[in-house]
Image: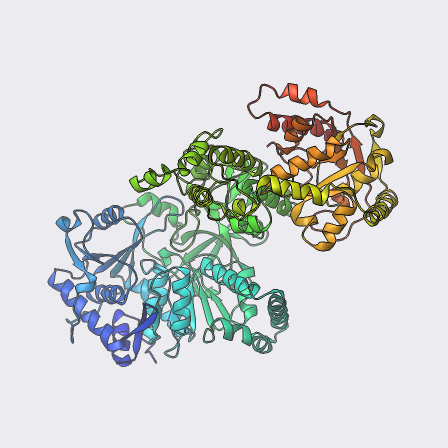
Amino acid sequence: MDQDTTTPWSPKDALLTLEQLDDRPAILAMKGGEAVPVSGTELRQSVFGAAAVLKENGVGPGSVVAIWAPNSPEWIAAALACHLLGAILAPIDALVPADEAADQIIASGASVALLDGDPPGALGERMTCLDLRQIPRHETGPPFDDLDTDHPVAQFRTSGTTGQAKVFRLNIGNIASNVQAIADTGLVSTDDRVLMPLPLHHVFPWITATLTCLTVGAPMILPESATGPHIAEALRTGRATIIVGVPRLYEAMLTGIRGRIASRGRPATLIFDAGTGLAKGLRSIGLGGVATAVTAPFRRAIAPDLRLLVSGGAHLPLEIEQALEAIGWDVRVGYGLAETAASVTAPSAAKRMGSVGLALSGTTIRIDRPGDDGTGEILISGPTVFSGYIDNPDADAEAFTDDRYFRTGDLGRLDDDGFVYITGRKKEVIVLPGGDNLYPEEVEKAYLDDPQIGEIGVMDRDGALVALIVPDLAETAKAGWMNAEDAIRVSLGSTAKRLPSTWRLAGFALTREPLPRTRLGKLKRFELPELYDRAKSEGSGHTARPLSAEDRQWIETPPRDAVWAILEGLDDARPFDLDSHLQLDLGLDSFAWMTLGVAIDEATGVRLDEADVAAIATVRNLLARVSDKAAGAGNEGPAMAETLAAERARWLTPRTAAERALGKVVELGNSAVMRLFFRLRVHGAETLPEDGPVIICPNHVSDIDAFAVAAALPSKLRRRVVWAATHERLFSTRFRRAFSRAVRGFPVNETMPNIAIELAVDSLANDGVQVWFPEGWRSPDGRLLPFHPGIGLIVERSGAPVVPTFISGSEEALPRERALPRPVPVTVTFGPPIPAETLIAKAADDANSAQAIADSLRTTIADIAKTDGVQTRDS
C-alpha cells in the first residue's frame, strides 16, 4: 500500500493503513491450529476502543501506561492507542514472574496497567488495571492530536546482558526514522505475510517489525506461543512469506531442517548437501538465479511461500547466513540497539554477506580507536538515537562521547563502501594474562561445531579460559558414551587441536539447565561465573525439589523403596529427586552402574540388562523400570549369568583353524607394516614376564595403538594376547566380528561393563596376556585422560601383574581427524611389571580401591610419558 514518504511518519499513518485495508486481514492470530484473521477494520476498531477506555481512565499525553501480556491483536491495538494518545507505553516481559512484573510496573511510574487477566498481587490497589480481553471495539475513536517529534511515547528497559538494566524513553522522532526507513526499502508489501514470533515488549519486534507492517499493510502472523512447534505451525498454516526473527531462531530452524533431511536416510542427506553446496558455489560467481532454481524443491518441501528472512536483535553467524542463503532464501540482517529504536542499519537493495548493511538515512557511524584491521567500538549519531537514560547520569556519561555520539559497546568495522561488520561486544572481550584478546562468541562458535555440545558459555576465571556447557545427551548417547563428562572432555580436546592455543579451555563444568539468555537469545554473561562455580561445586545445576505426598507414596512402594535407599547410600551422594539425571546429577558412569546393578539385584531380585540401562535416564525411569520388571513386565531380557555364558562361548572358546590362519596373517602383516612403515621402536620388552598371566596397560591416542602394542610384544606373549575393544567400533558388523574372533578380541560395552571385566578375568585365568586400555577412549589431544576403575577390578579379581605401557608417535601417525596414516615413527615403552599385590596393598585404605589402583597406574604411565614430554590431565 503506497505511503506518503514526504512527511514524517506518525502513528496516524498506521491507523490510515488499517482503514484502507478494510476487511482484508491485518493480523492472522494462530489459535488451536488455525489462523484466525483480524481485519484492518476490526483492528482499527480495537484501537479506537482501547483509546476510549484509556482516555476515560485519565490517560493523555505524558501518561505512562504499562502493558504485561503475551503477544495478541489486543496487545497491538492497545499499544498503538497509547502512541496515538501521546501516552508513554511501558511494555513488560510477559514471561517474568507476577511479583517481578508488579515491581516493574510500579517502578515504571504507570498510572494504568493493561493486563491479560487479573492484576498480580496488590497491584490493583496501587493503580487502575484493565483486562485487555475485556476492552470493547468502537466504530469511531477520540480525536488524536499531532505530536512533536521529541514527544516521548515509549519507555523500555535494557535487556540486562551485563546485569544492570537501565530505563530510557524513545520519542516520536526516534520511532518515525526507524519505521519510515524500513518501509522505504520496499522489501515488505501488502502481498506479504510476516511471521512475527518475537515478544512484542522488545524494541526490535515492536518498532521495526510491527509498526512497519501496520504502516505498509502487510498482514502479521502471530504464533500461539514462541515454542518451536507453534512457530512451525504458524509458518505452514499462515503461509508466511517473511520471518522476522533472531539468530537463535534461525539456528534452530536450520538444525530442524537438517534433522528432517537426515531422518529420511543417507541418500536424502547427500542430495540436500550436494544441492545446497552447488547453490552456494553458483551464488559465489554471481549466478544467484540459477542457485535459487536448484534448491527450489527443498524450499517447496519446507515452506513453499517463504522468501525473506530478516534477522536482528543479535549477531547472525556468517555460516548460518550462508546456509540459509544456499537453500534459496533471501537473508537480510540489520543492526541496532534498544537505545537506537532498534535500527542503525537496515536491509536494503544492496547487501554483502556477513555485513549488517548500510547506515540509515541521516545516521552517522564512526569507529572509535580502530585497530590495524579497522575494528573498534561503534559510535552512532542520528535521529534514531535516544536522548539519555532516566535518572542515571553516570550511565549517560558512560554512554555518550563529548560530541554526543552514542557508545554502542559493540565492536565492528566499516568497509570502503560503508557496510558495517560486527565482531563482538566491547565489554565481553576476554583479556587473558598474556595480553591476548578473545571474543567469546567466536570461541563458543568453534566448540559448538561438535553436536555433543548443546550450549556453551566461555568466561575468564582467575586468568584461565573456562566454559559452562550444556551437553546434548541424545548426541552423547548416539556416540556410545554413558558418561557425559568423558564425552565432553574428548569433544573439547578434539576441537581444541584445530584452534589457536589461546582458545583452548583450562576447565569446564556441565549443567543440565539452559544457559541464561534474554528473550532475544543473547547470553546473560554476567550470570555465567556464578553458575560455573556452582556447577563445579554442586554438580549439574539441577536443584532437587521436595517430594510431594504422591511422589513419596509412590517411592515407598516396594521394590521402589529399596532402589531409592540404594541411591541415597551411594558414595558422595548429592541431594536428588525423581527427575534427577543419573549421569549429570548423580554422577553415575558405567562402572558405578555396575555396582548399582549388583545392589539392585541383591535387594530386589531384579536384574537390569543392557537394554534397560540404555533406556534409563532419570531416577524416575530407574524406579519405574525396576518396578515393572519385578511385577513380571519386561523380564524377557537375558539374565546376567546367561549373558556372560553366551559372551564367553562367543569370544573365549578356541578358534577354528580358519580363524587361527586369518589371525596369523594379520599378525605377520601387522608386524611388517609397523616396523617398515611406522619404523616401530620398542623399549623395555626385556622386562616382560615370559610365563603366567599379565595385563598390558597402555595409554590410548590413536586407532593404531593396538597394532603398535601387538607388534611390540615378543612372539611368545603375542600368541597369548586377548584384546578388549570398544563394542561400537569393532563389533558392529559381521566382518568386524569375524576379524575380532580371528585376533582374539572381545567387546567392551559401556552399558554392561561387568561382562567385559569377567571376560578379561577369564582370559587371564588361562595364562593369557590381556591388553586393556584403561582410559576407555582415545585421548583427543595426546594427554592422559582419567583412568576408569575397570582396570582396578581386573587386577583385584585376577591377581595378575600389570605392565604400564606408553605409546608415543601414534597420534602424529594417525590422529583422530585423519583417515589415512602418515609414516611417522611410533615408539612403545614397557615399564617394569607391577605385582598385583603391590597395587592392591597400596589401595587398601581407599574406599574405592579399584579406582585407587587405576589412579596409581595412571601416575606410573604419566611418569613414563614425561620422558617424551607429554602432558597429563588431572582427573
Q: Residue at x 41, y 33 (%)?
A: 575
Q: Is residue 696 above or below residue 511?
A: above
- State the scheme by which the image is colored: rainbow
Q: State how many labels appear.
A: 0
| Residue 784 makes an appearance in the image | no
Left/right placement of residue 694 relative to residue 533 reads right
Task: Specify the farthest residue to the front.
Answer: 632
Q: Residue at x 42, y 68 (%)?
A: 243
Residue 215 in picture, x, y percent from top left: 32, 73
Quadrant containing the C terminus in the rendered view: top right
Residue 310 in picture, x, y percent from top left: 44, 66
Q: Is residue 617 above or below residue 208?
A: above
Q: Is residue 701 above or below residue 276?
A: above
Q: Residue at x 55, y 47 (%)?
A: 637
In this view, the residue in front, 756 or 18, is 756
In this view, the residue in front, 783 or 346, is 783
Residue 75 image-quadrant placement: bottom left
Quadrant containing the N terminus in the rendered view: bottom left
In this view, the residue in front, 347 or 43, is 43
In this view, the residue in front, 236 or 201, is 236
Residue 456 in picture, x, y percent from top left: 51, 47
| Residue 41 makes an appearance in the image | yes
